[in-house]
Image (cartoon, rainbow, N blue to C red):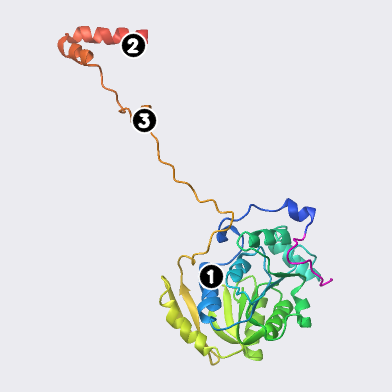
Amino acid sequence: MSSATAPASSPASSPAASDKTPARPEQLDDIPGWFFANDRLLFDWFLGDHQREVHGDLLELGAYLGKSATLLGRHLRPDEILTVCDLFDSDAADDANSAEMAGFYRSTLTRVNFEQNYLAFHDRLPEIIQAPTSVLADGRIPAGSCRFVHVDASHLYEHVAGDIQVARKALAPDGVIVLDDYRAEHTPEVAAAAWEAVFQHGLHPICLSSQKFYGTWGDPEPAVTALRAVVGTWPGRHTIDTTIAGESFVRLGGNGEPPAFPASRFHSPSVLRPTIRTAQEKAPASPRRPRLRRVAADLLPPLVVRAVKRRRRRSS
């Protein structure tokens, strides 16, 4: 497959893609995808407070419809580049990857949909490489240029192991790698590649969430210590200290609301309209009988009153 890509400012177009374009998102959660509240907190912390004094580019391998890429773009500084690499609606390079894409994503994953979602929140697109992530092994991402790499592409062992090595070369010494689906029941090959990187390739865990593995090839201790402290300020969350084969890190426990995220340019805030009651609604539920009727009912003999009521029922 050719590794050439269209310019980042011009969406890929095809009849199949344009026919499946979804509604424009108003909120981040309108973008389909598996990006849960705890990971949104961790992304915000790593990309923001933890890396406040760190400069470098951002890289995402596997983007689906842009939910996590949209959050990455929010943390992009003026001198930094966000690069996204995904097949989108291109053909996979091998049969196993083709079967995986058909099983997981069917016809929803298109570049048009990704670009529409991203541009709902940002003024310009990231650098897009529409190709297998393996093309990045040729060094097109400068070595040591990235401070954060999110790996969420193929779930096949060989591909994940290759993506981890791409991330290792791209990351600065204290950069952070995030591996998605490191423990899911349907992705044992991701788990194999992730822990192989720990035991054989010098990757140090920093934090584990229910969905993602956060690590570094630098010194993990400053991040682990800082994370223990900051999680205490997050409502409903806590850390669990864990050690595996001499590697000490934390697991993030608990749950709660995700951090706030600005609405998209297509957001239409609901207008609260005052409730206007009609004259009929304002009227009492059971209307009172006229005064003369009440007097007649009180004064006339019961026999006469019953006769009058029967005549009224027959005439109505």
User: Crowding near pointer 1: few (<14 within 10 Å), some, many (20+)?
Assistant: some
Amino acid on which the number 3 mark rests in the picture: Glu
In the visual, does 285 lie left or right of 127? left
Q: Of 316 and 267, which appears nearest the observer?
A: 267
Query: Looking at this rendering, what residue extends furthest in the bottom direction?
Result: 246
| Residue named by callout 3 | 281
Query: Looking at this rendering, what residue extends furthest in the right direction?
Result: 2
Answer whether residue 311 is visible to the viewer in this image.
yes
Q: Is residue 2 magenta?
A: yes
Instruction: Please provide the residue range marked out in magenta.
Output: 1-12
**Residue drawn at (64%, 52%) of the image:** 23
Amino acid on which the number 2 mark rests in the picture: Arg
Query: Which corner quadrant holds the C terminus?
Result: top left
- Seen in the picture, residue 269 relative to 168 is either above or below; the reply is above
* Residue 40, numbered label: 1
Earlier in the chain: of badge 2 and badge 3, it is: 3
| Residue named by callout 2 | 313
Counting from the top left corner in percent of width and height, residue 72 is at 60, 71
**Residue drawn at (49%, 65%) of the image:** 260
Residue 76 appears in which quarter of the rendering?
bottom right
| Separation of marks 1 and 3 at Cα, in angstroms | 48 Å
User: Crowding near pointer 3: few (<14 within 10 Å), some, many (20+)?
Assistant: few
Q: Of 258 and 188, which appears nearest the observer?
A: 258
- Seen in the picture, residue 261 relative to 270 is either above or below; the reply is below
